[in-house]
Image: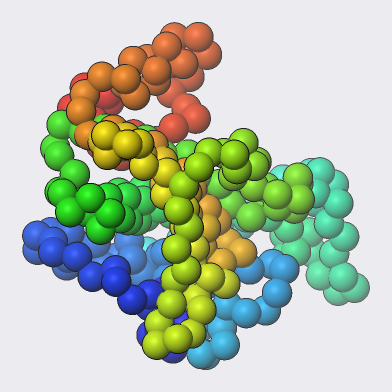
Amino acid sequence: MFQFRHWPEGFEFPACSDCNQGTDDHDLLISVFARMNPFAQTGDEDGKLHGLMKLANMQYPGLFQKMLPSASEARRHNREFGITPAAGQTHQETGVVRVPHELHDAVCVLGTKLAKGVFYRETGQVFPDQGCLLMNWFTNADLVRNGKYVVFDLLKDVAGDAPPTIRTGKYLGDQFEYKLSLAPERNVFILQARFGGAFGFAIFGRAVVGLLESSIIRLREQSAKSGPFAVLQSPTLG
């Protein structure tokens, strides 16, 4: 995921074999996804992107075809986002892409692992099995449509720490940065994370059963929908 293999210091955590070695395919998708930046050609400075995409296509045959919208979808999206194809380009080649379930699953795995890792880093405690983790994630389509990540804007006044991500003195915030808001009792938190110019998420965590689950149940009843949160972990929510 990190170019030139310069990942942030202080992000190595104890883990079981399933977490440490059982998510390689998801990690591969994230490595490709995190490098996708429509605003600056900075995702392949180490020349690894093409090889990563070939590996992803081997592990997930047909994935990139799934990501392409139909011609009519591409035209509609490009009108919405104000995107005009260059000479010789089609709308499908220049517009937004679909997010297949494989990519959604990979982001959920990343979010779960990162939230538990950061929780351990900040509290010295393993996030419990009875705890609840909910995630809202979004792509750079938010930036094109709104000029900002709406969720980050809604949470901007929530106090928290945003330590720099560094490797041997090199700042890595252009690839990954995060902010953690941790309650004084240290069992409720909000983790906001951004990965380059590609995507971001906000994860709401509570180390005991109760408050988060009841809030989601109310939302589901009011909207008759399962969103807008992906349930990363909960002993009671499906």
Relative image position of residue 21 (x, y in whole percent)? 17, 67
Q: Is residue 97 visible?
A: yes
In this orientation, which residue lies closer to the viewer: 60 or 177? 177
Relative image position of residue 226 (x, y in whole percent)? 43, 23
Relative image position of residue 158 (x, y in whole percent)? 53, 38
Residue 205, by quadrant, is: top left
Seen in the picture, residue 18 relative to 217 is either above or below; the reply is below
Image point 70% across, 74% down: which residue?
Answer: 40
Image point 51% across, 90% down: which residue?
Answer: 46
Residue 231, by quadrant, is: top left
* Horizontal side of residue 113 vs 45, given as left or right: left
Relative image position of residue 146 (x, y in whole percent)? 76, 45
Image point 76% across, 46% down: which residue?
Answer: 145
Q: Across the whole image, how many numbered discs are drawn on residues?
A: 0
The quadrant the C terminus occupies is top left
Seen in the picture, residue 4 relative to 136 is either above or below; the reply is below
Q: Is residue 203 visible?
A: no
Seen in the picture, residue 183 relative to 11 is either above or below; the reply is above
Seen in the picture, residue 61 relative to 49 is either above or below; the reply is above
* Horizontal side of residue 217 vs 156, given as left or right: left
Image point 50% across, 9% down: which residue?
Answer: 222
Residue 18, by quadrant, is: bottom left
